[in-house]
Amino acid sequence: MADQTDLSNLPARTSAMAAPAAARPGNLAAIIGRIEEVVDEETAGIRSGTAYDLKASNARKSRYLYELNRAMKGANEIEFLEQHREGLLRLRQKLARNEAAILAHLNAVNEVATLLRNAIQRADTDGTYSAGEFGMARA
């Protein structure tokens, strides 16, 4: 007896390569959107001056970039650029703002470090702990 199961309501079979390629454009747009979101969040966090968790933000960005690289495997780069031009331009602008915020933050940290270094050097050279105070500098 042959199995008479009705398969007419099931979707047509696709090859293993066709299914991911068909889903790829939407996935790429979603991944680009998630990258934009985390970059915006990081920029706002850095600018707000609060204790923003850069380590967690970097982990999210790394994960999304990994997803983007995986989604791009086997994709036509020219087609990708054409389909996602607006999203990529938006992302580039957001990354430029993020870079500016990070550089401003690093410059501020550098200034504070320089102030602390100078204060420590002045404290060390005020004569309080000089060799002459302890009778060691007699020649």
Image (cartoon, rainbow, N blue to C red):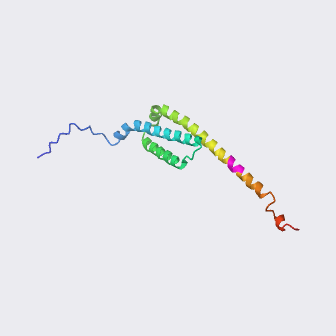
Q: Position of residue 33 (x, y in %)?
A: 46, 37
Please give the name of the residue rendered at 73% of the width and 55% of the height, measured from the top-left corner. Answer: 120
Check the picture and name the quadrant holding the C terminus: bottom right
Which of the two residues, 58 or 16, is positioned nearer the viewer here? 58
Please give the name of the residue rendered at 20% of the width and 39% of the height, measured from the top-left corner. Answer: 7
Specify whether residue 110 is painted magenta: no
Q: Position of residue 98 (x, y in %)?
A: 57, 39
Which residues lie in the magenta part?
111-115
Q: Main secondary structure of the magenta part?
A: helix
Which of the two residues, 13 or 87, is positioned nearer the viewer here? 87
Residue with the most extreme left position = 1
Residue 127 to residue 38: above or below: below
Which quadrant of the structure image shows residue 136?
Answer: bottom right
**Left of 58 or right of it: where is 15?**
left
**Left of 25 or right of it: where is 116?**
right
Q: Position of residue 97 (x, y in %)?
A: 58, 37
Q: Position of residue 84 (x, y in %)?
A: 46, 33
**Left of 49 or right of it: where is 68?**
left
Which of the two residues, 48 or 106, is positioned nearer the viewer here? 48
Please give the name of the residue rendered at 55% of the width and 40% of the height, measured from the top-left corner. Answer: 44
